[in-house]
Image (cartoon, rainbow, N blue to C red):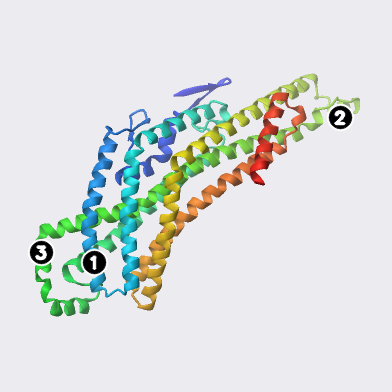
Amino acid sequence: MTTKFGNKFESKISVPEKLQELAKPVFQCLRAIGYLSLTIQPDCTVTGGWKSKASFWTLLTILLSLVTTSVVAGTTQKYQTIAKLTPTEKFVHNLLYTIFAVSGLTFQCMSLYKSKSSEMFWKFHNYQFELYTSLGEQFNFCLKNFKYAEKFSDIQKYTRRWVLIALVSSVAFILFGTVFSFYSIFYNISDPWDISGYEKNQEQGKGLNDQTASSPFIKISFIVAIVVWLFRIYLHSALVIYITLFLKLYCACLEVVAQELDEIQRKKFSNKEHSGTVTFKKFQLQPSVTICQEKDGYRSQKNSEETVGSCLECIDIIANLIDGFNDHFGFELLIQIVYCITLVLAYSFFTLFSIIKADHNNIVYCFNLSALLASQIYQLLTECGKIKTTVNQVLTSLCRLDLVKLPEDLQKNVGGILRVGTYLEYN
């Protein structure tokens, strides 16, 4: 597809294609665990609703979660017994299990319930970004040779990098957790790498013959249930990547606005010497300064006015997108932050107890998981903070404009935005 700006053609893709290009890896991860009930169409638009294939898959993941939750419940109780956990450790362990079970089912049910809302959320973004990219070549991030392409390629790299980290860490934690669960339930061993513990439990555990002699089908079913359960838990981090993806998009768009406004100011100072009357002395020193350059200055002023007008429209578009984001993700953000903070505290507790008991396996497991959860909180809070920082950057760029030389309607619009920004800053 091509589009024309002035006298030149630039290759571009559509806004839905660009958004899917940025979000596809995390989009697929969330669909896999039932956290996003949307189907991608061939034209890169998305559809939702109760009758969609994605909603049917989400319903299936809910049923799988219920089945695997019952299997893991038995494993949890068995592990607590053979690991000889203290009452306090048992309480924290049960709390973790409950949080994992309830939070997973909550997000899956919300995904199913909000399927149509999620579809409208994506369509709203397609529509608003179509408006954004239509305001000028300098705002069209779908162009192949986009002026600020690096900002959006960084977002794509961020998404792919963190999805890869989430998948690799998920596989590592799943292998670790499955081995522990398997030996706990079938061989009565809390540490599968402790051979002496295996021999000791085999001598003392006379009542375990039925479990150790379980059929291969039961063992395979158990492993599948544990893997499904752990996969959903550890791939939960994709939800944070998905949320921060939109925040990064808003920041990138606002940064483009700020840089365009700053460029107007730079051009003003670079052409300042030609803005007044050309005197005889100046003409003697630089005879090439002719009347046509005065016309160019006028044309440059008109272009600056158009750019300022486009920037103000961009600010309005991003403000609408942020409002839509808050409406759509407000509850999920609250649950996600509480979820991560609670788990970080719980796993920090287990890390401390593991250090006291010199349980090296649990130290590595709990510490790494705490670090992963802490990084999710950091990403959420950092990206939310960046929105405010970028808005302040835009307001600063607006303050530097010479409002006197702008048309009256633009002066009123800029003044209104600055007053609102000042009010929000101090209230």
Q: Residues within 10 Å of mark 2 (few under 14, many from 20)?
A: few
Q: Between 343 and 265, which is closer to the camera in this rendering?
A: 343
In this view, the mark in front (2 or 1)? 1
Q: Where is residue 8 in the image (x, y as percent from the top left)?
A: 55, 22
Secondary element at tag 2: helix
Q: Residue at x 64, y 35 (%)?
A: 260
**Residue 157 seen anywhere in this rendered image of the structure:** no
Whether label 2 touches label 1, CB < 8 Å: no
Q: Position of residue 238 (x, y in %)?
A: 38, 48
Give the label on residue 13, or none: none
Q: Residue at x 24, y 66 (%)?
A: 77
Where the N terminus falls, by quadrant?
Answer: top left
- Which residue does the numbered mark 1 point to in the structure image? 77
Vertical order, 120 against 232 (above or below): above
x, y percent for residue 290: 80, 21
**Quick one: SS at disc 3?**
loop
Residue bearing mark 3: 214
- Residue identified by numbered label 2: 285
Is 57 above or below relative to 104? above
